[in-house]
Amino acid sequence: MIVPLVLLLALLSEVNATKTVSLQKNKVCVVDGDTEPTVTVMKGKNKQLVCKARCLNTESCQGFFFNGVEKKCYRYSDKVLQMKKAKGKDKDKMFCGIAKIITEPPTDAPTVTSAPTTSTPSLNPSPGHSKNFVWDFNTVCTGKPNPNRSVKYKKTFKTLDACIMKCGQTEKCKSFSWKESKEECVIYMYRITDIAVSDPKTGMKVCGKIPKPPNPPSAAPTTSPPTVPPPTKAPTPAPRCVLKGVLAFDFKDPDDAPYYGYHACYLEVTKDSDDYHICSHEYYDWLPGWCSYKNSDPEKGDSTYVENTEDYYYPDAAEALTSETVVVRKAGKETIRFSSYHYFFDEDYYTNYKGWEDHAMAPRLKIYNMSNKKQKRVGKPEGYSHPTDKKTSTHIKKKNGDWVINPKYKGNFEVTVTCTAKCNCKAKHRSWAGQVNRMSDGNSVRGPKGKVPTRRQDPNFSSRTN
């Protein structure tokens, strides 16, 4: 039986207004207790939403798990402690939902104006901050956030109070928005003017801001003209300080590489004053306002990568060469860390053939000062890289044929840049061995996939997997 959309909406509309259920894909539920769940076989379309609606309409339901492979809905009367990332090829068919009771029920159609009135709920200053906010349930901040004056935190803030506290403790924050389903909190360094009503069926959403200050009272009339103070000098703006870091190989064509093989490193940039953000490809969707990231291959590039194969044996093989660029703004009076990490593949390929010493290659990091005419380069003009040695490979082959990472291979390095208020910067370099691999999974970086055939087995072998 196919569930009509009208019936689905009817199920959702009958829900107690004080109860909400957050739903996330690619998740499994961790339950506190051993009470057997209520299991229902689902049919038709929108099965996970119907499962959610059933949980909302069941008073004892504290959460649910929908298995898209089995097409079954599991409703739990025990508390769901957390959601964990699903694994396996069918992970995108797994859904977990957690029921919550909100302390103040949302209205079906809250009145929201561009400037909140006194009827809008307000939050008194908390012990952690001294700001007042006005907000309402089931509201969203409209308009695209200014990336230079807002910060987005995803899957971090599970409660509304935590998001409000973050804005309250951030000195320049004047507005905030929170989405329960995504555990997302956005703080704005300016006062939001446009607020819209959201559909409560899509999950709890809140948009809040500090109240607009009242107009100052008119000055009482005087018999004599007021004394006009002499004009004051405009405050001197803080010097602009922008750095640009480029991680790239010293050649512009893969065929110009000194060796054959595959070599990948990836760039991460952090600010000591920001404990939350990492500026890199892996965190591209969560980049802070003080940085931007760019790869020379916008569609497939996720690292600084070279793939150079022997043209004689592989005339049709796809080769690759990519680089990474990070721009850091507001670097004055800051410590910026440019870190390059080597990405280790499953093994060291073609070690029996001459010229396949890809471990002896290394990209070079060059840092440019974009704001100080007297200092165009920060640190060494030739840049920085991790040490290379033809005798020190990335991997070691054990007697049983397994490959392990060579503990002596120093494939990681960091350049710490410290800048003054006038953007005069100094650099300090260090390198170390070991595997860091913060990439999302082993298939995210280009390179050989699976067992690489020998030349004679497959003369037309192409190693590029993306």
Image (cartoon, rainbow, N blue to C red):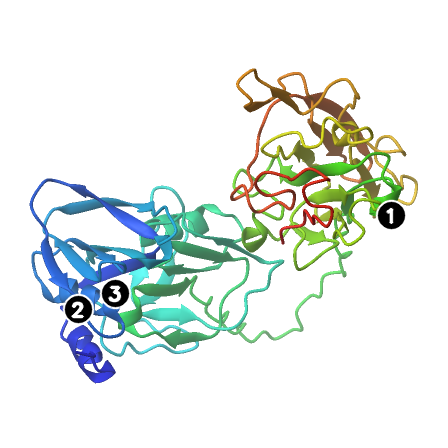
Give the labeled residue for mark 3: 48
Tag in front: 3 or 2: 3
**Is residue 15 depicted above or below 342 in this figure?**
below
Who comes first in sequence, dot 1 or dot 3?
Answer: 3
- The percent coordinates of residue 429 (x first, y second) are 75, 25
Depth order, front residue of 306/210: 306
Quadrant hosting residue 116: bottom left
- C-alpha gap between disc 3 and disc 2: 20 Å
The image's mark for residue 252 is 1
Image side of residue 93 versus residue 4, left or right: right
Query: Which secondary structure, mark 1?
Result: loop
Q: What's under tag 2, amino acid-wise? A: Ala
- C-alpha gap between disc 1 and disc 3: 50 Å
User: Circles 3 and 2: CB distance less than 8 Å?
Assistant: no
Say if residue 204 shows up in the picture: yes
- The percent coordinates of residue 344 (x first, y second) are 62, 32
User: Circles 1 and 3: CB distance less than 8 Å?
Assistant: no
Mark 2 Cα within 10 Å, few/some/many (few <14, many 20+)? some
Image side of residue 98 versus residue 210, left or right: left
